[in-house]
Image: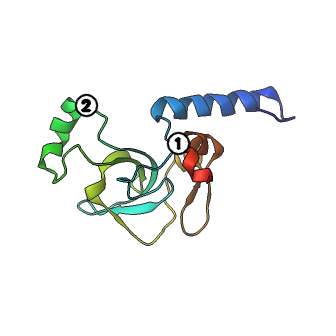
Amino acid sequence: CTTTVPSTYCEVLEAREAELRSMLSDKPAKHSSVTFSVGDVVLHKRYNYTCVIYGWDTVCSLGSAWEERMGISQLEFRAEQPFYKVLADDQTVRYVAQENLVATRSLFIEHRDVGKYFCLYDGERFVPNSALRRIYSYLDT
């Protein structure tokens, strides 16, 4: 942290970045199979909730026990499709298969964790904060 602000600010910022890194793996480039981007507002087709994407994996990474419990084998593309980490408008944090999401008109999502990942909503999408942009470095290109 390079600032003249007291060091506690830097410590908090660094702790947040470490927390983000532990939850998300580095993504230097957007994979061709990934349809949506970090900051996009999307709609869940089946459960009709609106959410903002704060991360993604090219395939499901939560393991076979979770996949079985969630019925992932019933999906057309099963676990072999991108899964998105989302903040939903019902205040939940979810992990969603790409085939269950559809683009929608952008709305501001009221979620307690929005400020943890985003610094701004520009009317179209959420703008990732510096910690999230470090993980998804392709966002800066």
Q: Which secondary structure, mark 1? A: loop
- Can you give x and y, in whole percent of width and height, for residue 29 in the image? 50, 46
Q: Is residue 135 visible?
A: yes
In which quadrant of the rendered image does the C terminus lie? bottom right
The image shows residue 107, relative to residue 65, as above or below, that is below
Q: Which secondary structure, mark 2? A: loop
Q: In terms of depth relative to the viewer, which is nearer, 110 or 19?
A: 19
Q: In terms of depth relative to the viewer, which is nearer, 76 or 33?
A: 33
> Given this view, does label 1 or label 2 mark the residue nearer the observer?
1
Q: How many numbered marks does the figure carry?
A: 2
Horizontal relation, residue 141 to residue 105: left or right: right
Asked if the residue under mark 2 is in contact with the one under mark 1, i.e. CB atoms within 8 Å, the reply is no
- Can you give x and y, in whole percent of width and height, for residue 54 in the image? 48, 48
- Can you give x and y, in whole percent of width and height, for residue 7 in the image? 79, 27
Residue type beneath disc 2: Gly
Q: In terms of depth relative to the viewer, which is nearer, 54 or 133?
A: 133
Q: Residue at 59%, 48% (x, y): give it.
A: 115
Horizontal relation, residue 122 to residue 50: left or right: right
Horizontal relation, residue 4 to residue 139: left or right: right
Instruction: Give the residue pinned by disc 1.
Output: 28
Q: Residue at 51%, 56% (x, y): give it.
A: 39
Instruction: Give the residue pinned by disc 2.
Output: 63
Render colour scheme: rainbow
Horizontal relation, residue 52 to residue 94: left or right: right
Please tell me in which quadrant of the rendered image residue 69 appears: top left
Give the crowd class for mark 1: few <14, some 14-19, many >=20 residues within 10 Å.
few
Give the crowd class for mark 2: few <14, some 14-19, many >=20 residues within 10 Å.
few
Q: CA distance from mark 1 to mark 2?
A: 23 Å
- Can you give x and y, in whole percent of width and height, for residue 17 in the image? 60, 33
